[in-house]
Image (cartoon, helix red, strand yellow):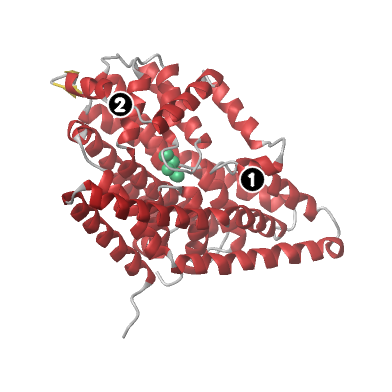
Amino acid sequence: MKKIKPHWQMFLALVLAALLGVILRQFDPQFAAPVVETLEFVGKLFMSLLKMIIVPLVVSSVVVGIASLHGVKGFGRLFAKTTGFYALSSLLAIILGLFLVNLIEPGLVDGKPNESIKEAFSQHEASDEAKKKVEAARVRSMAEKSPGDQLKGFFLRMVPANIFQAASSNGQMLGLIFFSICFAIAMTRLPLERVSPLTQVFQALNEVMIVLTNAIMALAPIGVFALIVPVVFTTGGELFVSLGKYFGTVLLALGLHLFVVMPLIIRCLARVSPWAHFKAMKQALLTAFSTASSSATLPITMRCIQEEAGVSKKTASFTLPLGATVNMDGTALYECVAVIFVAQVMGFEMTLTAQFMVVLSALLTSVGVAGIPSASLVAIFVILTNSGIPGAETAVVALLAVDRVLDMSRTAVNVFGDSCAALVVAKSEGENVLSGS
Ligand code: ASP
């Protein structure tokens, strides 16, 4: 029998999981709950498998990538191109979100605040997990009151006082990447014969991590299945109905960015077929969608961009780990739509200056958001409080309750954005990417 291709296996797993989720909802919860709990457990194990390899993978690939640049010069050029692309694509995403949320006005009815959403917000009971997240967000909003503070926060997170602590902070890899870059640059300053044993160690480590990534990928269909069933099973309820227009706005904006803006960018800047790039990245996109974590998806993103799209290790190792941490187009777009939506619901007048500050904050905070599920809700809380929009707490708790589907979608956009940057930078470096297209 012909073997089903891995991405089709994952896609099938997604569809079957959605079906099972819907079927389980028809059953008595007492019967369905143990099934869902078991799958949740398997899903967690799969997420842990992915996360388990991130630290050695990031460190070894960043070190191997930069050490192969033979000096700081090539690094500076790569850094400028990558960060320039990240800033531009995030800004485009935010502007798109801002435009659509002002056009569709999901928080208003006949030009007035939608009272039923406001009521649904205040009636929604916060879960313990939501309470914890809101508390963490409150602490951060105290420290990051203005865009200037947010920028300072970013630099403080970037330079870690303790690299082991940086390595263990969930989804926040900035400190680890910064240390790895410094380490690799220092290696290039030493005579080749002195550092070559070390280079070989990192190279071998990197190759081992690639073998592990491939092994974990073989389990991806099971992981995807186990992650999606609980999402479909628990999703639903009144909040979803009242937030329908908001969902539509977010999904439309994300869809336009993913299927129109980014393809146009890669077509113009890298001169490659966007379709071929989508095909190359399909496993990474499906993993991002299922896990809602761009950090956990990183090993797969690295694999797809090198093995399917033909980007060199040097470019991929620099652009992708950084991108998974600082470049979040979908998140930036979402933050902007969510903040303006809450302002509309609360009847808070957003002047042009206030909207500009939201754009700036969305850009800066999206850089600091960790690549883990629902991380951007913290940033939304920070922006809402700092903009003086009332009801930040009730709104964030309610948005958190219905976040998963939107989170899955924006994470796929985040990962695709990173891969586009890798492609464009690789092409500008003269690499022969997507040679088949
Ligand atoms: N889940 C997103 C990611 O990992 C972050 C977020 O927007 O919450 O990319």
Pick whichever of labels 1 and 2 is earlier in the sequence: 2
Determine if the C-beta at disc 1 is less than 8 A from ligand 1. no
Outermost residue to the front:
30
Percent across and percent down for residue 310 are 51, 67
At mark 2, the secondary structure is loop
> Which quadrant would the C terminus be assigned to in this image?
bottom left
Percent across and percent down for residue 156 are 64, 30
Percent across and percent down for residue 205 are 67, 64
Name the residue: 29% across, 46% down: 255
> Where is 216 relative to 58, above or below?
below
Please give left or right for residue 50 compared with residue 115 in the image.
Answer: right
Q: What kind of residue is marked 2?
A: Glu
At mark 1, the secondary structure is helix
Please give left or right for residue 111 compared with residue 52 in the image.
Answer: left
Crowding at mark 1 (Cα within 10 Å: few <14, some 14-19, many 20+): many
**Would residue 157 be visible to someone looking at this image?**
yes
Task: Name the front one of labels 1 and 2.
Answer: 2
Work out how far the residue at label 1 is from the one at label 2, CA to CA, in angstroms. Answer: 35 Å
Residue at the disc numbered 2: 125
> Where is 279 relative to 182, above or below?
below
User: Residue 249 has which mark?
Assistant: none
Name the residue: 41% across, 24% down: 358
Quadrant of the picture in which ligand 1 is shown: top left
Crowding at mark 2 (Cα within 10 Å: few <14, some 14-19, many 20+): some
> Where is 21 relative to 374, above or below?
below
Occupied quadrant, residue 120? top left
Percent across and percent down for residue 243 are 22, 32
Residue at the disc numbered 1: 167
